[in-house]
Image (cartoon, rainbow, N blue to C red):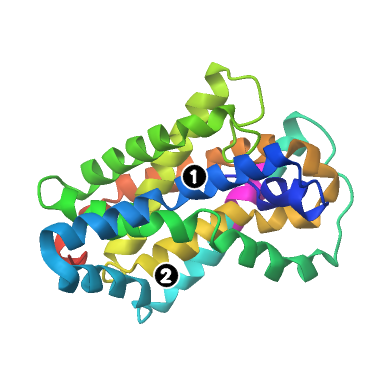
Amino acid sequence: MDTLDYWFKPFVRGNHSRNNWQVFNIFFIGVYGPTVSALLTTIIFDGFAGGLTLLKKFFIWNVPFKNYLFIILLPLIFVIIGIGLYNLLIGDIGSFDKMAFLSIPTILWAGLYAGPLGEELGWRGFLLPELLQRFSNLKSTIIIGLIWFIWHIPLWWAPFGTLVSGEPISFIPVLTYLAMLICLSIIITWLVINSKGSVLIAILFHLSINAGIVLLFFPDLNVDFKKIHLLSSVGMLIFTGILIVKNKLKTSANKVHN
């Protein structure tokens, strides 16, 4: 999870050094690991028919309209909370660029294949239904969150890829990053189990989180975008707490189709 402008900045600006491209290629090989692994495992054990059934989860779009609103609004609210806390605790947020909306399509298109498209078939399309056969919705999603966190660890020593990447590794950012991924895992599971097991919904929410759209309108915060995202964990924790307290994950596991 990271701001896409930072991920692609060296390449957009023409910094195409050999080392950058090596990191870039390794990054994408890793990104598509969950999806490729899920598809191969399914084909091995369930045949090509099983693989086709898994792929069909990409195209489950006919879900409650409110879920699409959550995909748009929740990430916006989380980042707005982060910006508000930054302004309160750290410093000025700078000017507002009202023309930044012109960059949104590019950011979303670039971000689609830089994470969500490569991961979600593995995490929510394959692993979630498998875990739900043995564990509760909450326990299953926490397990996925922990696996998701561990899977990102190699990127901590890369120049980009996570909110810990490119910085000295310290306890507080790592702990916050873990909390964020657990929260996001719970939120995505909640959306998926209420969307007929749709991987499309998981991809769109993951994309919306990664894009950090609100930050496009505050260019002076680019240098501190990681702090903003880490502060946005407050909103994630609050919303996740509401889901748990109100038992919103109690939805029957059979809504996540194998």
Q: Nearer the viewer, residue 126 or 102?
A: 126
Q: Is residue 192 left or right of residue 212?
A: left
- The residue wearing badge 2 is 67
Residue in view at x 48 percent, y 65 percent: 204
Residue 26: horizontal and vertical position, in percent? 53, 43
Q: How many C-alpha atoms fall within 10 Å of the one at disc 1: few (<14), some, or many (≥20)?
A: many
Residue at the limit of the structure toward the bottom, as seen here: 62
Label 1 sits on a secondary structure element that is helix
Residue 164: horizontal and vertical position, in percent? 58, 30
Image quadrant holding the C terminus, namely bottom left
Q: Is residue 96 left or right of residue 21?
A: right
Residue in view at x 76 percent, y 56 percent: 216
Q: Nearer the viewer, residue 77 or 212?
A: 212
The segment highlighted magenta reads 76-82
Q: Amino acid at mark 1?
A: Met
Residue in view at x 75 percent, y 51 percent: 11
Residue at the limit of the structure toward the front, as seen here: 18
Residue 251 is at least partly visible in this image? no
- The residue wearing badge 1 is 236
Residue at the limit of the structure toward the right, as seen here: 95
Q: Main secondary structure of the magenta part?
A: helix
Q: How many C-alpha atoms fall within 10 Å of the one at disc 2: few (<14), some, or many (≥20)?
A: some
